[in-house]
Image (spheres, grey):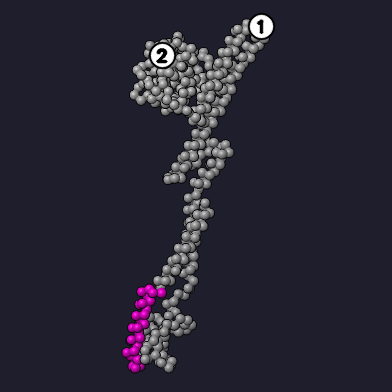
Amino acid sequence: MQRRLFFAFGFAILASGGTFALVSWALGTSSPWREQVARVERFTAGRFDLVWDERAARRELTVAVARDLAVGVRLYDESGRTLESAGAWDDCHHVQEVRIPGRGRLDVCVDSHMPRRPWAFFVALLVSGAVLWAFAGRWSRRITRPLRELTDVARDLGEGRLDRRARLRHGQKGEVGELTGAINEMASRIQRQLEAERELLATVSHEMRTPLARIRVLVELGREGKDGKDVFAGVEREVIEMDALVGDLLAGARIDFGSLQLSEIAVDDVARRALDRAGLAPDALALVGSPGVVRADATLLARALSALLDNAVKHGAGLPTLRVARAADRVRFEVEDDGAGFPPGAATHAFEPFSKGQNSSGTGLGLAIVRRIAEAHRGRAWAKNREEGGAVVGFEIPA
């Protein structure tokens, strides 16, 4: 692009110079200066016509014209005989002839008024064009420098160097500035996402080893004659925990890829089904008013409610309560329990991935998925302690 701009500027300069020369030549053939010269010629011819027959006056006029105009002057009669001569005539190359009707002619040597170096104009034009072209090269480089840098940054990002960023120079605005900001933000998002995925993969690998190790121990116990009922119950618990981990990961993947399948869902129905899947009694549901319907992804919404209920069952004392209410244009889902609540400062970290309470089991992904599901539906999630004891964890989405 820089090369194209450079040659484009050069062509524009040459075209401008040629146009200037052409217009100057065209105007010069019929310029006021030419008309002034013609009037001077007529005036001079008239003056010589008046003193033609008076030799002294004619001589005086010839010397005066040569002196005042700094030219060479020669006066001829009609036969070509020289009558008067004054001024410099050595190496005269340009003679202007003035006709004196019925008398003769007047030759004027105008070499002193002609340019001594006729090529000087073209040299000056060439030098001016070269200087302008040099500035054009500098400006074309300055214009294309941000694009070259963006190209290098994009190439480095494609090669995996996600820490590369384009520098937004002082005063750089407009489309290039917006493009620079967009590429930097895109690189930051990709870097954060890949770092989160690496952390998730490492943590999931660790979390999967724990139930697998316990299953391996249970299998060995079964081979040694341990009570099969206890062994199978233990294996079932570990499989359920692994299934919950895989379900959370799949839910997170659906959110990452933006593959939400929105539909109209009756709030009370999805709440009752969540209680049933969690093995809780229907009277654990507390509907405040008429929640109506929401437009949401049924699978993800059910997953969020299951995660809330599972978290309350594991960490709360007694049966939890699922409270569903509608406030203005929002539907709120809250699960209350009678447990010990969150330790001081722990509620703010409850939704971080793999955040677990003391002496707790599970993968630590449940509440993190709740928050991601709520945000994917343009909502929010929260966790806090109740004044009367226990904790409440919930989320809300647009009605």
Q: Is residue 224 left or right of residue 385?
A: right
Circle 2: residue type:
Leu
Residue 215 in picture, x, y percent from top left: 61, 14
Rounded to the nearest angstrom, the CA distance separating label 2 from label 1 is 44 Å
Reply yes or no: does residue 53 show up in magenta: yes
Count of labels in the image = 2
Dot 2 lies on which element?
A: strand
Res 346 visible: no
Residue located 57% across and 15% down the image: 238
Residue located 42% across and 77% down the image: 113
Given residues 47 and 248, the one toward you in this image is: 248
The magenta segment: 29-56
For residue 97, above or below residue 207: below
Circle 1: residue type:
Gly
For residue 32, above or below residue 187: below
Residue located 52% across and 52% down the image: 2
- Between disc 2 and disc 1, whose residue precedes? 1
Q: Quadrant of residue 66?
A: bottom left
Given residues 341 and 204, the one toward you in this image is: 204
For residue 316, above or below residue 142: above
- Which residue position holds label 2? 285
Q: Main secondary structure of the magenta part?
A: helix
Dot 2 surroundings within 10 Å: few (below 14), some, or many (20 or more)?
Answer: some
**Are the two marked residues, 2 and 1, in contact with CB atoms closer than 8 angstroms?**
no
Dot 1 surroundings within 10 Å: few (below 14), some, or many (20 or more)?
Answer: few
Residue located 58% across and 20% down the image: 208
Q: Quadrant of residue 206?
A: top right
- Which residue position holds label 1? 225
